[in-house]
């Protein structure tokens, strides 16, 4: 069955035209000199070779057979018995067929080799893509370097860790500047040693990251080192959780100590207040009465601190119920709205998706209001507090973002410690108690702050 596509190929018409034109000259100039016909006969090789190159073996054979058939009548016209000329003509037909076969066969073999090469290239490309997909799917950064520590390949996790995409062609010492790491890279290359769990810190923008590296020499087929393979694990989250654990242990110890101290102090403070009130009622001396009033006020203030200590050390049992987070946040906004308006502060509440959580509503309300008031106190000239919610990892993240003065970097680690405060009249128990409440809800609280730009407090709570 003839392929219809061939009729759309311009080379088919060129080859056909050449055969027709050459044949026409042969038969239209029968009386011409024999040398002219020899010339025309030689021209037949052009379409045969063209057909072989274009259509390979099939094209070479078909075109040579067609040429032979078209040329055959010419033999009978000029046949004058057996002669060298006649033998040359028969030999020419044999050459048509031979040239068509040989040229077509060679082109066919070349085509098959090219096709085989293309298939191998496709297979290699597929294998490379498959390998890259595997490496990109690994939850660790994987990169390779040449002997000069120039990065030759990376996976997506490396881009994510370092916050850059175009790292190929970059010297690794540009992103890993720790001198100890550079020494280890040289040792791995020169001594062919494998290193694992190498700790280092890097800074990506304003964020500090803690990394664990596994460094191995990369060998070629001659067992010579042609570079390094480095596996990078971002341990920032584990580092944070470790700090959370240490902080929790410290808070528990402080809480137990605070509880004991609070009980020991409360009794004598109660006695002092009782005696002061009795003396105030009995004595009429104005100066003495004023002094006794000061003592009573200070005792009351001290009692508030003691109550805070006791709440921190042994909080009241939570009344856990299923509640709507969006309704709780709307209540908090309603409660704080007038206070914020007086301070020239606007509030934005963005609830991504309503969700229910198991929680003590009043305790969470206490936490949220405390965080909002802290934000207000950091914005003496007005500003904005934004509350965002987002569902992540089978839980919900509530972000409180203010545009205040921010927190100094050296204070961020101390912010949850009891009695740590940067306020003149602050006690320093608000965030400690808030941390304890969120922890009792199986959640966690984090703070990120930049001086003069503002603070973001994130609270993660599991969904019901």
Image (cartoon, helix red, strand yellow):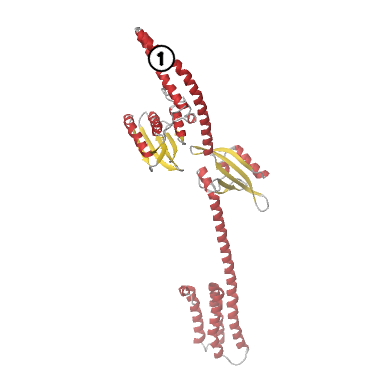
Q: Quarter of the image containing the C terminus?
A: top left
On the rendered structure, is 226 left or right of 36?
right
Q: Is residue 401 left or right of residue 175?
A: left
Q: Residue 170: percent from the left, percent from the top?
A: 55, 46
Q: How many numbered tags mark residues here?
A: 1
**Label 1 crowd bin: few (<14), some (14–19), many (20+), radius 10 Å:** some
- Residue 242: horizontal and vertical position, in percent? 54, 35
One can see residue 447 in this view:
no
- In the image, residue 258 sits, relative to residue 177, either above or below, namely above
Q: Where on the picture, by quarter, is residue 69?
A: bottom right
Locate residue 141: give its quadrant. top right
Image quarter of residue 187: top right
* Residue drawn at x 60%, y 72% as measured from the top left: 106
Q: Disc 1 designates what residue?
A: 273
In this rendering, the answer to whether 393 lies above or below 416 is below
Among all residues in the image, which is located at the extreme bottom? 81
Foreground: 112 or 413? 413
Give the vertical position of 337 relative to 219 (above or below).
Answer: above
- Compared across the picture, whether 457 is left or right of 150 comes to left
Residue 41 in the image: above or below residue 347: below
Question: What residue do we see at 40% from left, 41% from top?
Answer: 356
Q: What secondary structure is marked by label 1? A: helix
Picture coordinates of residue 83, whole percent (x, y): 62, 90
Residue 1 placed where, x, y %?
Answer: 49, 77
Front-most of 142 and 340? 340
Does residue 386 show up? Answer: yes
Foreground pick, 174 / 410: 410
């Amino acid at each position: 069955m003839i392929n219809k596509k061939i009729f759309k190929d311009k080379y088919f018409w060129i080859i056909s035209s050449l055969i027709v034109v050459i044949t026409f000259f042969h038969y239209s100039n029968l009386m011409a000199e024999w040398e002219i016909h020899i010339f025309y006969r030689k021209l037949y090789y052009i379409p045969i070779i063209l057909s072989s190159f274009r259509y390979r073996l099939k094209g070479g054979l078909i075109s040579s057979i067609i040429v032979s058939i078209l040329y055959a009548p010419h033999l009978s016209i000029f046949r004058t018995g057996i002669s060298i000329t006649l033998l040359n003509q028969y030999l020419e037909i044999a050459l048509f067929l031979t040239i068509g076969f040989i040229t077509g066969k060679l082109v066919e073999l070349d085509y098959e080799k090219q096709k085989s090469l293309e298939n191998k290239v496709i297979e290699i490309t597929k294998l490379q893509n498959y390998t890259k997909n595997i490496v990109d799917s690994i939850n660790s950064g994987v990169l390779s370097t040449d002997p000069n520590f120039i990065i030759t390949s990376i996976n997506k996790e490396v881009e994510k860790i370092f916050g850059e995409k175009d790292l190929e062609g970059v010297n690794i010492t540009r992103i890993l500047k720790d001198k100890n790491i550079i020494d280890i890279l040289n040792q791995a290359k020169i001594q062919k040693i494998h290193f694992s769990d190498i700790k280092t810190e890097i800074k990506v923008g304003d964020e500090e990251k803690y990394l664990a590296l596994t460094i191995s020499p990369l060998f070629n087929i001659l067992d010579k080192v042609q570079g390094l393979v480095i596996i990078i694990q971002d341990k920032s989250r584990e580092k944070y959780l470790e700090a959370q654990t240490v902080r929790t242990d410290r808070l528990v110890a402080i809480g137990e100590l605070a509880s004991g101290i609070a009980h020991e102090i409360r009794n004598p403070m109660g006695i002092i207040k009782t005696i002061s009130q009795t003396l105030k009622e009995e004595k009429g001396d104005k100066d003495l009465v004023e002094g006794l009033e000061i003592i009573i006020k200070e005792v009351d203030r001290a009692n508030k601190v003691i109550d805070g200590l006791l709440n921190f050390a042994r909080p009241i049992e939570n009344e856990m119920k299923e509640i709507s987070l969006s309704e709780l946040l709307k209540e908090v906004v309603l409660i704080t709205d007038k206070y914020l308006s007086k301070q020239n502060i606007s509030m934005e509440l963005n609830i991504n998706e309503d969700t229910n959580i198991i929680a003590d509503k009043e305790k969470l309300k206490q936490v949220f209001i405390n965080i909002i008031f802290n934000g207000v106190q950091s914005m003496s000239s007005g500003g904005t507090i934004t509350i965002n919610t987002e569902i992540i990892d089978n839980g919900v993240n509530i972000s409180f973002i203010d545009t205040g003065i921010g927190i100094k970097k050296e204070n961020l680690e101390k912010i949850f410690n009891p009695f740590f405060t940067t306020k003149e009249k602050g006690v320093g128990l608000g965030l400690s108690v808030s941390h304890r409440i969120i922890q009792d809800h199986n959640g966690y609280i984090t703070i990120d702050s930049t001086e003069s730009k503002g603070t973001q407090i994130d609270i993660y709570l599991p969904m019901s």
